[in-house]
């Protein structure tokens, strides 16, 4: 049975098979977790991303991790929050689904996710966490992932995930 955990800290430091980036459609870097991942992985990551020709919202693409401890980076593009009536929930779920498909494709058994879209893109954190957990729970067994962590960069996000992960109805 796969294990889901909430952890606090910086995703770039984790020794897992794959970390997920909260990218934008250009895949050419940005601020937040995206900036931190590019800084830690080195310039080869930007070179690899250029070859991907961008990525649609709700999708994800894989690159190597280069100088990161993680072997792979899955660059997921979450939706910008526009109030919830523009398909944001389904697009966010798509990011988590697509990353689990990528994990199956590359054989990643341990994967770490940041709270996609909850920073600059302003998706409400609790709503985002519910979608993340429900999507992962429904897909993880078919993905081959055995250890999945939700990396929380602040105490409020950690509190939300710890609370929701204890609710087995999600
Ligand atoms: N480790 C883990 N989580 C982090 C880290 C880190 N090192 N740094 C920030 N977070 P954001 P978005 C958390 O804004 O909302 C970029 O410019 C952060 O606290 O990084 O999807 C991209 O290029 C928040 O909970 O991503 C896009 O243009 C979460 O990561 C845009 O921002 C996501 O915040 C994407 O916006």
Image (tube, rainbow, N blue to C red):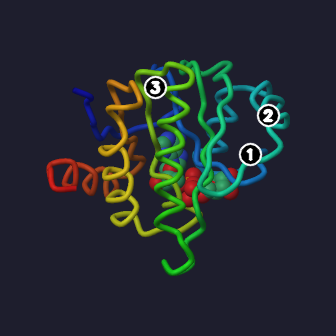
Question: Residue 53: which quarter of the image?
Answer: top right
- Which corner quadrant of the image does residue 66 belong to? top right
Give me the C-alpha separation between circle 3 and circle 1: 20 Å
Residue bearing mark 2? 46
**Residue at disc 2, CB closer than 8 Å to ligand 1:** no
The image shows residue 81, relative to residue 79, as above or below, that is below
Question: Helix, strand, or loop for circle 2?
Answer: helix
Discs 1, 2 touching: Cβ within 8 Å = yes
Q: Which part of the image, by quadrant, shows the C terminus? A: bottom left
Q: Nearer the viewer, residue 13 or 110?
A: 110
Disc number at residue 14? Answer: 3
Q: Secondary structure at mark 1?
A: loop
Q: Classify residue 110 as left or right of residue 77.
A: left
What is the x, y in percent for residue 31?
A: 67, 51
Pick whichever of labels 2 and 3 is earlier in the sequence: 3
Rendered image: mark on residue 29: 1
Q: Is mark 3 within 8 Å of ligand 1?
A: no
Is 7 placed above or below 167 here?
above
Q: Gap in Å between the C-alphas at discs 1 and 2? A: 7 Å
Q: Position of residue 60 (x, y in %)?
A: 62, 43
């Amino acid at each position: 049975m796969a294990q889901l955990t909430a952890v606090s800290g910086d995703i770039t430091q984790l020794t897992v098979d794959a970390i997920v980036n909260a990218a934008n459609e250009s895949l050419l870097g940005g601020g937040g977790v995206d900036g931190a991942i590019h800084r830690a992985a080195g310039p080869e990551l930007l070179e690899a991303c250029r070859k991907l020709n961008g990525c649609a919202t709700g999708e994800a693409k894989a690159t190597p991790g280069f100088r990161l401890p993680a072997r792979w980076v899955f660059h997921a593009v979450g939706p910008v929050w526009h109030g919830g009536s523009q398909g944001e929930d389904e697009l966010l779920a798509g990011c988590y689904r697509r990353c689990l498909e990528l994990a199956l494709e590359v054989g990643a058994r341990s994967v770490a996710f940041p709270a996609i879209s909850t920073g600059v893109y302003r998706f409400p954190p609790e709503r985002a966490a519910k979608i993340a957990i429900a999507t992962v729970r429904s897909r993880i067994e078919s993905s081959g992932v055995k250890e999945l962590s939700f990396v929380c960069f602040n105490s409020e996000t950690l509190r939300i995930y710890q609370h929701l992960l204890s609710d087995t109805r999600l």
